[in-house]
Amino acid sequence: MRTRGGSVGARVIPPALRGSLGFLLNKPAHEYRELLDPRLEPLGLTGKTLAMLKLLEAAPGPLTQHRIGALARVDRSTIVTLVDLLEGRGFVSRGKVPGDRRAHAVALTPKGRAALPAARRVEARVQAAFLSGLAPAERRTLMGLLARLLQASRSKEEA
Amino acid sequence: MRTRGGSVGARVIPPALRGSLGFLLNKPAHEYRELLDPRLEPLGLTGKTLAMLKLLEAAPGPLTQHRIGALARVDRSTIVTLVDLLEGRGFVSRGKVPGDRRAHAVALTPKGRAALPAARRVEARVQAAFLSGLAPAERRTLMGLLARLLQASRSKEEA
DNA sequence: TATTGTTATACTCTATAACTATA
DNA sequence: TATAGTTATAGAGTATAACAATA
């Protein structure tokens, strides 16, 4: 009662769920994380910490934790843990912010910068594998639409 | 130091994150759930339990918990809790499966069936609001691409 | 031996509230 | 008074492992 590849029938998306946006967003999100994180683990990273590293690399200089949270849409209390992880690995450092002794200047260390290329390659491979069911143009479309969705949503802040 | 709408700058997606599929999938998934679940709560449902209700409605008859899990790609241990919730609300019932005394026949009750139209209307409204930044055609494209992504992914099962 | 449902447990992700040290 | 970072905590979401009943 189980052919090769699953006659059980979980391969096809039930029509009843094809219109459920929550299902369509949550499942891939979860599956992608399960795929990427183990591959980044040998490098001492996860999808989330890698994203933070990329954010820091793209910035003109150090960022405060508050600023990182604003960019990544994550609460500042959550940022603490992520920075702790990266600092523990020696990928970032917490320095001083001239003019504000409350804030921390989170900066990419040489080690953190050096870790980025390999991590990016891993991410690119995993991402390509995960998206392999879609044509290149479709992948761009999908990511573009998701980005616009995110841009349109106010999530927390708004009057 | 905070203009209307957030000069803080979290509105735009940082270029560094536009290529991070994990970020693009996780954030909308999370935000959508935060939006939908409170709206379904007065009806005694959540996005997940509503999805299960829709699955049962579309089925020709009762489904075993194992079957529900296969369709929704959720572990059977997780299904237990969801069925418990729906059963507690009187939306589904656990009956017997002729021929297999291990399995439970999860069936929609009249009350469960009656709850669906209103829940669907709420879901449609929330979904439309969440997708309001996209044109109708784009919404269909997005959901279609997500569905294909899910269809292509093997998640757990495979040789 | 394998499968269905169940329970116990554990892990991740994320946020809220309260505290501190500043501003 | 308000903000940056921290800590403690709580809650959702999900899975694995082990067990009983049954196949």
Image (cartoon, coloured by chain):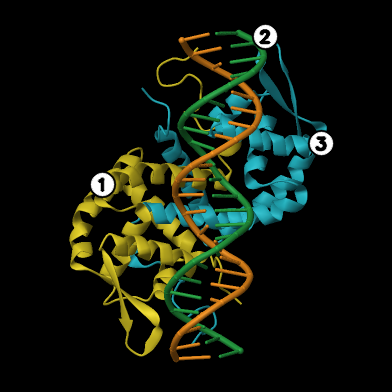
Chain colours: A yellow, B cyan, C orange, D green
Please name the amino acid that badge 1 sits on.
Pro
Q: Are marks 1 and 2 in contact (CB under 8 Å)?
A: no
Label 2 Cα neighbours within 10 Å, binned few <14 / some 14-19 / many ≥20:
few
Using the image, tell me which numbered label, if any, was put on residue B99: 2
Of labels 3 and 2, the one closer to you? 2
Label 1 Cα neighbours within 10 Å, binned few <14 / some 14-19 / many ≥20:
few
Distance from the alpha carbon under mark 1 to that under mark 3: 51 Å
**SS state under label 2:** loop
Picture quarter containing residue A6? Answer: top left
Distance from the alpha carbon under mark 1 to that under mark 2: 49 Å
**SS state under label 1:** helix
Do dots 3 and 2 share one subunit? Answer: yes
- B20 above or below B105? below
Would you name the residue on which mark 3 appears?
A: B111
Do dots 1 and 3 share one subunit? Answer: no
Picture quarter containing residue A129? Answer: top left
Instruction: Determine the chain carrying the residue at label 2.
Output: B
Of labels 1 and 3, the one closer to you? 1
In front of the other: B128 or A128: A128
Using the image, tell me which numbered label, if any, was put on residue A42: 1
For the point 28% across and 71% down, which residue is it?
A93
Please name the amino acid that badge 3 sits on.
Lys
Please name the amino acid that badge 2 sits on.
Gly
For the point 23% across and 63% down, which residue is it?
A112
**Could you say where residue A100 lies in the image, as x and y percent from the top left?**
39, 87
In front of the other: B47 or B76: B76
Which quarter of the image is occupied by the C terminus of chain B? top left
